[in-house]
Image: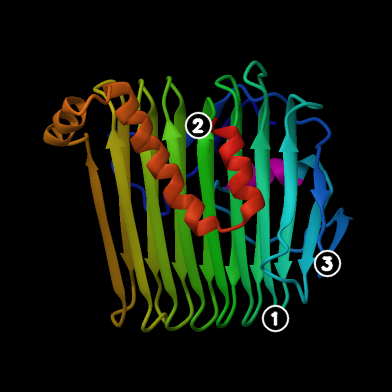
Amino acid sequence: MDASLRLNQMPSPTWNRLKVNEAVERGFAAAKEPFEEKKVPGGVSFEQKKETAFPDQKTGAGEEVQKTVSSSNIPARSFVFENSKEDEPLYIELPAKENKSALLPIELSVKAGSKGVAVMFFTCEDDEEVEQCVQTKYEVLAGASLTLIQIISLSKKSRLISDIGGKVEENGKFHLIQLVLKGGQIDLGALSDLSGKKSSLETDIVYLTGQDEVLDINEIANHIGKNTNSLIRVNGVLSENGKKTFRGTIDLRRGAKGAVGTETEEVLLMDDGVVNRSVPVILCTEEDVEGNHGATIGKIDQDTLFYLESRGIPEEMIYDMLSKAVVDSIKKKIGDEATIKRIDELTR
């Protein structure tokens, strides 16, 4: 991989002095052979492909990551969902045991009328130092649905780029769920083209970022078709000098009549040493549309803190309870018992 990568660029840059227009990853080593363990359920086919099925599909991390993946000549792991069921997820393990530096392209295609769920686990031991770049491209055809779940629990020395991009056709639905439990430097980029009439995007990102960890998020929803709908929700806890940047762009393009885009964010600041940067953006070149955004950012209410402490609950335990509540909120949306059990194991 390139020694330095520019990624997670905002579609509409703001003042450079704010230093939020993009992220820069420095010092990445060259990618080695990728790794993967997979469990393919019924209704899902798998093959390795040297030529990508989506060569022109843009992604959230941006052009430099795209070029890095393309030039690597690493075959894409391609999964096709046809006659698949939501209660039979595809589980993809991405453990950082065999290779400390790895790059992997993944493709997910859901055929018309089918329903697919893919769960990715990014894990490593606490004492390991690893670098991963995983690019996931997807397509959701007419009347189909795809839920992509990413569970991230890496060491403080690890770095991850999760780059996502795809399109949703008429009456299709794409739901992205990302849970970041820990990891030294995590970059999340996702771009969705809502190209078909009444197509929809739902994004839920939950994170616990502390102990000098850095999280960089770039979410882009392109409303292209008529009556499209997007809902981006970000909810997290910052503690112990943790740093987080969230860029959320809803682009209501000309011709997307009746489109509705919404983004919301909730950030709990545990102490004075954390850094939070939030950049919600709504772009619009169509009149008959609706765009909404809102954010709630702050510390725990002092009256609430005093009340709980007066009941004999130590301050450290109170913060642990609040972090657990944030994680529990996303577990309800995941629904899959095997994935929830794995989350419980990772958070013990």
Residue type at mark 1: give it: Ala
Residue type at mark 2: give it: Val
Which of the labelled discs sits on residue 24, or is there none?
Answer: 2
- Disc 3: which residue: 42
Query: From the image, which quarter does the N terminus lie in?
Result: top right
Does 66 lie within the magenta span? Answer: yes
Q: Residues within 10 Å of mark 2 (few under 14, many from 20)?
A: few
Mark 1 and mark 2 residues within 8 Å of each other at the beta carbon: no
Taking the image as shown, residue 341 lies to the left or right of residue 73, namely left
On screen, residue 302 above or below 68: above
Nearer the N terminus, badge 3 or badge 1? Answer: 3
Disc 3 from disc 1: Cα separation: 17 Å
Q: Residue furthest top?
A: 127
x, y percentage for residue 3? 63, 25
x, y percentage for residue 260? 35, 74
Disc 3 from disc 2: Cα separation: 40 Å
Q: Which residues lie in the magenta part?
A: 63-70
Mark 3 and mark 1 residues within 8 Å of each other at the beta carbon: no
Element on which disc 3 rests = loop
Which of the labelled discs sits on residue 112, or is there none?
Answer: 1
On screen, residue 167 above or below 103: below
